[in-house]
């Protein structure tokens, strides 16, 4: 019998699925898509050409048909997005289906397998404790990092001017060694010109530091609108604060702003609540702490400056009189600052698909800011971290392609979990 793993490897074989001891075989061949029900040994050629009796065929063999015009029909079918969507849905349903092996085991063996499952649940609970201790360790080291991050913030907002010694960088020294005498004279003249220009401009700190970071990272730049940029020029720092010892696991992103004309807040916050314990209904899915929900904050916008809303004008015609009037309406507007008003999860935990997708993306962004942006901000400012991320992704893709269990649908290194009736995957922290 053909293994489902072969499909992941890209082999042109069949898929086997056990459904009440009846096996359904499917195969995409150069000349069409076939299904065989092994109870009836009847092959259906799905392009609609004709049905073929296949009683002489052995289950598991590749099925083919000599059908006039079948290749053209197959091409037409594969160009139809509705057919492709239906096919993908069917294949998704087949992937991961039980093989039927467990059902065939004797009762006494099944009993022992259940004992192993109970041991596995206990392992999951130990793993949960491990991650809780990791969280405590992370909190401890966050306190050690913070003075360095505070100094970074002071340099960015011009509260502190670094010394010559602090500004020395090895790469600059290596570059200087490669410069010839003639080039040295040119470089000196160029530096003097730049110094004069800088004295005229007199820039303070590192202008637009965080805005540049956001624009350099695709995950964040996709959220930015043109009207967000003037506001984010006033962003001076982003901090991560962990929950106090003994409190439920959580972290808060603090966005610190200088005084500006857009809102009166000096700090905007986003809190992510986490859970590090196996789900009673699905303990084997536990893979570390999960972000369960998040809460934003109220932005006190200056009148007329709220970029999360826009005013539109619509013309309405009176049914009776036939007169036309213009109606002004306020509607939501795309903006980075919608990040601070995430969808609320109802008490029953059920969300519509759009809200589910928004929350899943939100969790990924919050996790990314915490894990990558805040600790390595200068490298995202210069673009060096982006190159490293691209290299890492290239290596991961190569590893995944060689992994027989690789699922191309789950390609992101960050998975999300929302505490709703319809579950997505957890964010491993």
Image (cartoon, helix red, strand yellow):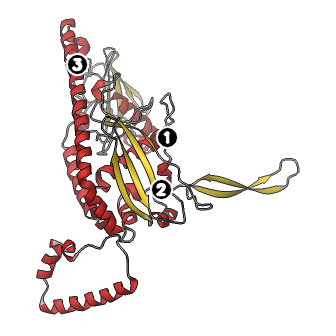
- Residue 380 visible in the displayed image: no
Q: Which residue is mark 1?
A: 355
Kindly report which numbered mark, 2 or 3, lies closer to the viewer in this rendering.
2
Q: Which residue is mark 2?
A: 336
Who is closer to the viewer here, 104 or 234?
Answer: 234
Disc 2 packing (10 Å; few <14; some 14–19; many ≥20): many
Q: CA distance from mark 3 to mark 1?
A: 35 Å
Disc 3 packing (10 Å; few <14; some 14–19; many ≥20): some
Q: Residue at x 31, y 65 (%)?
A: 381
Quadrant where the N terminus is found in the figure: top left
Q: CA distance from mark 1 to mark 2?
A: 16 Å
- Residue 263 visible in the displayed image: yes
Q: CA distance from mark 2 to mark 3?
A: 45 Å
**Is residue 106 placed above or below 16 in the rendered structure?**
above
- Residue 129, horizontal then vertical, whole percent: 23, 31
Q: Residue at x 33, y 89 (%)?
A: 196
Residue 109 found in image quarter: top left
| Left or right: residue 251 compared with residue 163 | right
Q: Which residue is mark 3?
A: 117
Q: Earlier in the sequence, mark 1 or mark 2?
A: 2
- Residue 326, horizontal then vertical, whole percent: 76, 57
- Residue 279, horizontal then vertical, whole percent: 33, 26
Question: Marks 2 and 3: CB-CB under 8 Å?
Answer: no
Q: Secondary structure at mark 3?
A: helix
């Amino acid at each position: 019998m053909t293994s489902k793993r072969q499909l992941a490897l890209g082999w042109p074989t069949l898929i086997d699925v056990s459904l009440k001891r009846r096996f359904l075989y499917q195969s995409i061949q150069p000349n069409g898509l076939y299904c065989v029900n092994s109870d009836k040994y009847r092959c259906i050629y799905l392009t609609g050409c004709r049905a073929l009796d296949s009683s002489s065929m052995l289950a598991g063999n590749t099925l083919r048909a000599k059908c006039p015009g079948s290749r053209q029909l197959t091409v037409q079918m594969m160009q139809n997005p509705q057919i492709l969507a239906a096919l993908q849905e069917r294949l998704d349903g087949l992937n991961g289906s039980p093989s039927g092996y467990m059902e065939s085991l004797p009762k006494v063996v099944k009993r022992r397998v259940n004992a192993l499952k109970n041991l596995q649940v206990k392992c999951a609970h130990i793993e949960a404790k491990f991650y809780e201790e990791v969280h405590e360790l992370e909190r401890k080291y966050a306190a050690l990092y913070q003075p360095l991050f505070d100094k970074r913030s002071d340099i960015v907002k011009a509260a502190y001017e670094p010394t010559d010694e602090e500004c020395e960088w090895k790469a600059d020294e290596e570059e200087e060694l490669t410069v010839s005498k003639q080039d040295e004279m040119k470089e000196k003249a160029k530096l003097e010109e730049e110094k004069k220009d800088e004295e005229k401009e007199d820039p303070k700190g590192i202008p637009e530091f965080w805005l540049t970071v956001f624009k350099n990272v695709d995950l964040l730049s996709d959220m930015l609108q043109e009207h967000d940029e003037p506001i984010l020029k006033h962003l001076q720092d982003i901090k991560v604060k962990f929950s106090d010892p003994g409190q439920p696991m959580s972290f808060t992103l603090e966005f610190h702003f200088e005084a500006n004309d857009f809102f009166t807040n000096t700090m905007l916050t986003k809190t992510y609540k986490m859970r590090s314990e196996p789900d009673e209904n699905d303990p084997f899915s536990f893979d570390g702490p999960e972000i369960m929900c998040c809460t934003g904050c109220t932005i006190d916008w200056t009148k007329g400056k709220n970029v999360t809303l826009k005013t539109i004008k619509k013309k309405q015609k009176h049914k009776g009189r036939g007169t036309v009037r213009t109606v002004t309406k306020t509607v939501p507007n795309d903006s980075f600052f919608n990040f601070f008003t995430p969808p609320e999860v109802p008490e029953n935990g059920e969300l519509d698909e759009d809200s589910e997708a928004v929350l899943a993306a939100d969790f990924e962004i919050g996790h990314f800011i915490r894990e990558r942006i805040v600790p390595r901000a200068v490298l995202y400012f210069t673009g060096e971290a982006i190159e490293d991320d691209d290299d890492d992704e290239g290596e991961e893709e190569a590893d995944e392609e060689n992994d027989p269990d690789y699922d191309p649908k789950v390609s992101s290194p960050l998975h999300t979990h929302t505490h709703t009736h319809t579950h997505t995957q957890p964010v491993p922290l």
